Structures are given as C-alpha cells and as structure tokens.
Image (tube, rainbow, N blue to C red):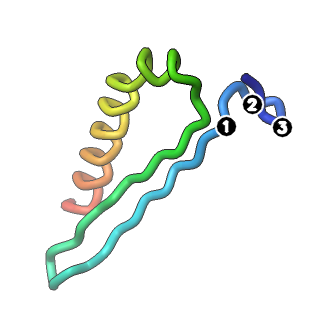
Amino acid sequence: MACPDGAPLDFNLWIQLKQVAPYDTRMKITVKAELNMMMKMLLKDKLQKGIDAMADQIAMAFNR
C-alpha cells in the first residue's frame, strides 16, 4: 500500500495532554492507520508496544 506522497503507510498520530489538576496531567495517544485485516493482525501487538514505549518516554520527559 502506498500513499500519494510515496510513503509506504498512511497513518496519523495524535497526542493529547490535558491538565486535570495541578501536577496531574493525563495523556491520550491516538493512532489511525489504513491497514488491511491481515496487517492489523500481524502488527497489533508491535504497534501497541511501540505506543506504550512512546507514552512512557513522554511521561519520563515531563517528570524531570
């Protein structure tokens, strides 16, 4: 699958940070990818691990 700009995969990544109280910020990471069913099954766990690692790194950066 190819995007109009030649990229091999079309996806969007959206990171939301919301302060709910002083010293309490919540994070939501949303990923939208155009994948067929076979690719979803193959990549689901790896994508989840990658997103979890990204969230951990963002949280560590804000806690310094």
Q: Residue furthest front?
A: 37
The quadrant where residue 9 appears: top right
- Disc 2 crowd, CA 10 A, few/some/many (<14, 14-19, 20+): few
Q: Residue at coordinates 43% horizontally, 52% vertically from top-left?
A: 30
The residue tagged 1 is 10
Quick one: 46 or 39, which is closer to the camera?
39
Determine the secondary structure under disc 3. Answer: loop
Quick one: 33 or 25, which is closer to the camera?
33
Is disc 3 in contact with disc 2, using a CB cutoff of under 8 Å?
A: yes
CA distance separating discs 3 and 2: 6 Å
Quick one: 50 or 60, which is closer to the camera?
50
Determine the secondary structure under disc 2. Answer: loop
The residue tagged 2 is 7
Residue 62 x %, y %: 26, 62
The quadrant where residue 51 appears: top left
For the C terminus, the image quarter is bottom left
Callout 3 amino acid = Asp
The residue tagged 3 is 5
Is disc 3 in contact with disc 1, using a CB cutoff of under 8 Å?
A: no
Is disc 1 in contact with disc 2, using a CB cutoff of under 8 Å?
A: yes
Callout 1 amino acid = Asp
